[in-house]
Image (spheres, rainbow, N blue to C red):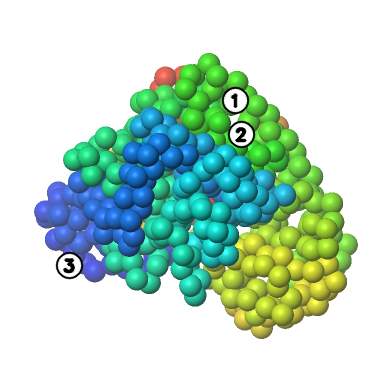
């Protein structure tokens, strides 16, 4: 990996924070990296409060949305809550559906079928609403570009409220209300909400109309926190507040569905990283392999007993998902070798039989082996459906956009996108995309980079330092776990490998000149380097600092990111 130390921060601001906060130079530098320069900013960072949430009525069309929902509640109209099949979409639907159900609305939910309907608002969904006598559809995490669909619903006498966070097209849909902080005409101060976050702002506005504050909605924040980390939106501003309190709910009194999923792990507490790896993939698997409605059912269950039944079903679906994506990943890696494309600067692979629901995961897996812009295609009738993933600093959205003559459908952002092309255009698209990547990607961007916050001595890692570091949580996009570098580290002789294939590394280390301080080091996937670092060989380590809970005991361990044998 390419080790890159973050730029040095302003020493005067660091010194000021040291004085007003009573923190050491390392902690103060980490704060400045996060654009925290004053006592008040540090207080807001370390002590998130619901009072920091913005007035929801600052969002364009919020007054119209609230008025229409209030009318539907008063007139006992049938309301349909419509959402995407991923984590953000299903948690959004569960959020608004649960709230409306609690408020005795006549409400039902709808998740489109990934394979039959595709992403976003569908004609089938609108026809379903018409058959059910629905007068109002609330669309979540989708809809900002569904102009024709909204118009079709209008012709059937169905109103739309859109709650989205994706970039709008040239024209805003003609809905009753379109809530999207990324609208150019929306003055809402925080632009990085996920779809579930926009749904939460609608609920906050409805409660505000009753004279209630956001504390009335805290019990719903386990859903919002899950969506925030799964959708990888920045953990800054309002997202930090919502995730902070959502994580508290997850650790104290989560809804039955989330509690059921977590019951299969024996932990005292959970971090947002746990939610990313232990909850989000299972929720996602429902829509990838079976149907997203399974996830909504789980997240809206009344009883823990019934939620356990749903959780076991979803876990089983996720196991199937893991088997399928591992199988396809192996096939895709073989294709890269067979097609003599190991040294290419881009990966484009296709198989007509690959499962559409997992090709995005497969694209990410391929990048783990061949670090370069990647598109994985499978066939859907006369079309190919593709999922694209990129590497740091390369805009894959722009690269695909340059192939517009071959695109039937396309959407996404800088690092991830989805696209549809015709079967007969595959070879030409592949050739042009690879040419664009070859001409624009920098060689250095084809080597994974590892950003390092600070060089420190192991003596810095004291109980007080760890307590303060924990207050930087929750970690995520925009507030990453600090990464440290230490030199002249050696194993004291108790190291060993772990795992079924000895693929992981466990060391017990000290630092030259600081022989009284020792720490455990855990290196996932570093087992093959055991011989190189054993027998007191010196190395330089890049790592994060984490607490390890085992058999009721808490200890500090360094989690290896990379190493350099001296």
Element under label 3?
Answer: helix
* Residue located beneath label 1 in the image: 310
| x 81%, y 73%: residue | 425
Q: Kindly indicate the quadrant of the structure image that contains residue 298.
A: top right
Q: Is residue 229 in view from this perspective?
A: no
Could you tell me which secondary element the residue under label 1 belongs to?
helix
Which residue does the image show at 32% across and 49% down from the upper left?
A: 66
Mark 1 and mark 2 in contact (Cβ < 8 Å)?
yes
Q: Find residue 291 and report its horizontal and vertical position in percent.
A: 66, 39
Identify the mark at residue 532; answer none if there is no mark. Answer: none
Left/right of residue 51 with respect to residue 383 in the rendered view = left
Q: Is residue 6 left or right of residue 344?
A: left
Q: Earlier in the sequence, mark 3 or mark 2?
A: 3
- Quarter of the picture holding the N terminus: bottom right
Which of discs 3 and 1 lies nearer the camera? The answer is 1
Q: Residue furthest top?
A: 305
Q: Which residue is mark 2?
A: 294
Residue denoted by label 3: 12
Q: CA distance from mark 3 to mark 2?
A: 54 Å
Q: Residue at x 48, y 46 (%)?
A: 135
Of the pair 155 and 52, the residue shown nearer to us: 155
Residue 400 can be seen in this image: yes
Nearer to the camera, 69 or 362: 69
């Amino acid at each position: 990996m390419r080790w890159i130390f973050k730029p040095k921060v302003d020493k005067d601001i660091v010194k000021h924070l040291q004085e007003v906060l009573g923190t050491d130079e390392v902690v103060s530098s980490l704060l400045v990296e996060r654009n925290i320069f004053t006592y008040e900013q540090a207080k807001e960072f370390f002590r998130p409060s619901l009072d920091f949430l913005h007035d929801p009525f600052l969002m364009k069309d919020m007054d119209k949305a609230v008025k229409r929902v209030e009318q539907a509640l008063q007139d006992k109209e049938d309301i349909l809550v419509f959402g995407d099949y991923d984590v953000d979409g299903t948690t959004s639907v569960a959020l608004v559906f649960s709230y409306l159900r609690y408020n005795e609305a006549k409400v039902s939910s709808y998740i489109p079928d990934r394979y039959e309907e595709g992403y976003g608002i569908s004609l089938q969904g609108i026809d379903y609403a018409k058959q059910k006598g629905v007068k109002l559809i609330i669309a979540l995490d989708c809809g900002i570009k569904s102009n024709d669909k909204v118009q079709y619903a209008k012709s059937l006498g169905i109103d739309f409220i859109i709650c989205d966070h994706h970039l709008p097209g040239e024209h805003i849909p003609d809905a009753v209300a379109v809530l999207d902080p990324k609208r150019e005409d929306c003055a809402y101060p925080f632009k990085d909400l996920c779809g579930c976050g926009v749904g939460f702002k609608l609920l906050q506005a409805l409660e505000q109309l009753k004279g209630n504050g956001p504390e009335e909605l805290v019990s719903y924040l386990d859903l919002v926190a899950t969506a925030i980390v799964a959708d990888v939106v920045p953990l800054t501003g309002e997202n930090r507040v919502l995730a902070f309190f959502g994580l508290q709910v997850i650790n104290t009194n989560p809804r039955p569905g989330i509690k059921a999923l977590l019951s299969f792990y024996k932990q005292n507490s959970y971090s947002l990283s746990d939610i990313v790896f232990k909850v989000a993939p299972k929720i996602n698997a429902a829509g990838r392999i079976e149907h997203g409605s399974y996830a909504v059912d789980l997240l809206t269950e009344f009883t823990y007993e019934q939620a356990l039944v749903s959780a076991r079903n979803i876990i089983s679906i996720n196991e199937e998902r893991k088997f399928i994506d591992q199988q396809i990943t192996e096939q895709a890696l073989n294709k890269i070798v067979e097609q003599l494309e190991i040294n290419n600067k881009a990966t484009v692979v296709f198989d007509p039989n690959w499962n559409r629901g997992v090709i995005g995961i497969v694209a990410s897996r391929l990048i783990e082996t061949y670090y370069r812009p990647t598109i994985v295609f499978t066939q859907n009738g006369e079309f190919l459906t593709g999922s694209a993933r990129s590497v740091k600093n390369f805009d894959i959205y722009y690269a695909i956009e340059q192939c517009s003559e071959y695109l039937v459908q396309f959407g996404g952002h800088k690092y991830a996108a989805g696209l549809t092309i015709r079967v007969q255009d595959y070879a030409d698209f592949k050739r042009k995309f690879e040419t664009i990547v070859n001409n624009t990607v920098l060689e250095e961007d084809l080597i994974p980079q590892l950003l390092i916050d600070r060089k420190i001595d192991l003596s810095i890692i004291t109980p007080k330092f760890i307590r303060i570091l924990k207050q930087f949580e929750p970690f995520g996009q925009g507030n990453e776990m600090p990464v440290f570098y230490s030199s002249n580290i050696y194993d004291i002789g108790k190291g060993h490998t772990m795992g079924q294939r000895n693929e992981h590394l466990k060391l017990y280390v000290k630092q030259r000149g600081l022989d009284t301080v020792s720490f455990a080091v855990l290196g996932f996937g570093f087992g093959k380097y055991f011989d190189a670092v054993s027998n007191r060989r010196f190395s330089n380590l890049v790592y994060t600092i984490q607490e390890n809970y085992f058999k009721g005991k808490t200890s500090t361990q360094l989690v290896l990111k990379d190493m350099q044998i001296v």
